[in-house]
Amino acid sequence: PHEAWARHAAEGFSPMRVTDDEARPLFRPQVLRTVRRCELEFIGNRYFARELEEFHGDQVAVGYDIHDASKVWVYDGEGRFLCTAELNGNSRDYMPASYVERAREKRAEAREKRALAHLDEIRAERDGGYALEMDAPLSIPGLGTITPEQLRSRSAATLEMQAERIDEPRPAAATAQATTAQVFTLPTAPAQRYRQWCELAERQRSGQPIEPDAAQWFEVYPKSKEFAAQQRQA
């Protein structure tokens, strides 16, 4: 290639060379923007140039440097250079955010949201831990959404009802059956609920009777995501 270039140069060939200032715009990406009162908006920043006053309402090409958000280069529809628009005091950020910085911020925010969601899942599956504050409603598979206070009140009412039934006079066989009856109370921790289900499964395999509330929850709980997560940890 060098010999061919030298041969053509000896024959009178004169290449058209571009200066660094002429070559630099060739590598800048461009976007189309509409001029509004000598201003252009781009990636949340506002740029101003007095030379754009006569182009109000016109669409122009805006060249930008992905590493420098301090100014942009404005061209008309035919590619002729019009002016350089500087970042003014009406920008959204005190310090201008370049295209690369804005993309980096968006990626970091997305990663942070995914990490927080994963942390909530870990807390929910943790043995003996609570994914929610004790004053917050609990979403219990098979029973729906219920607050801890409602859960305690429901358990207390069940115990009181059972006590009243035991105090009532009844035949000896019925009394013996009532005293041996167990009150089904669902634990609030995921790991404890999974152990409760395993105990019910063992009772079912051995032919022991299961309370109606417990039997209903026993059938619904294996269909939940919590059950699958606890089963993987077992």
Image (cartoon, helix red, strand yellow):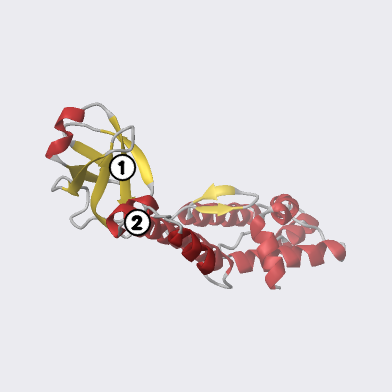
With 105 as the anchor, is 211 left or right in this view? Answer: right
Quadrant of the rendered image containing residue 104: bottom left
Write down the residue under mark 2: 66
User: Can you give x and y, in whole percent of width and height, for residue 29 in the image?
Assistant: 38, 49
Toward the viewer: 108 or 46?
Answer: 46
Residue 220's label in the rendered image is none
Please state if 105 lies on the left or on the right of 146 as rendered.
left
Q: Amino acid at mark 1?
A: Val
Depth check, front residue: 229 or 96: 96
Residue farthest toward the top in the current orientation of the protein: 57
Horizontally, residue 51 falls left or right of residue 40, namely left
Q: Give the spatial CA distance, label 1 vs label 2.
A: 12 Å
Out of 142 and 203, give the one closest to the viewer. Answer: 142
Q: Residue at the location (70% across, 61% down)?
A: 228
The residue pinned by badge 1 equals 62
Point out residue 35 in the picture as x, y percentages from the top left corner. 24, 33
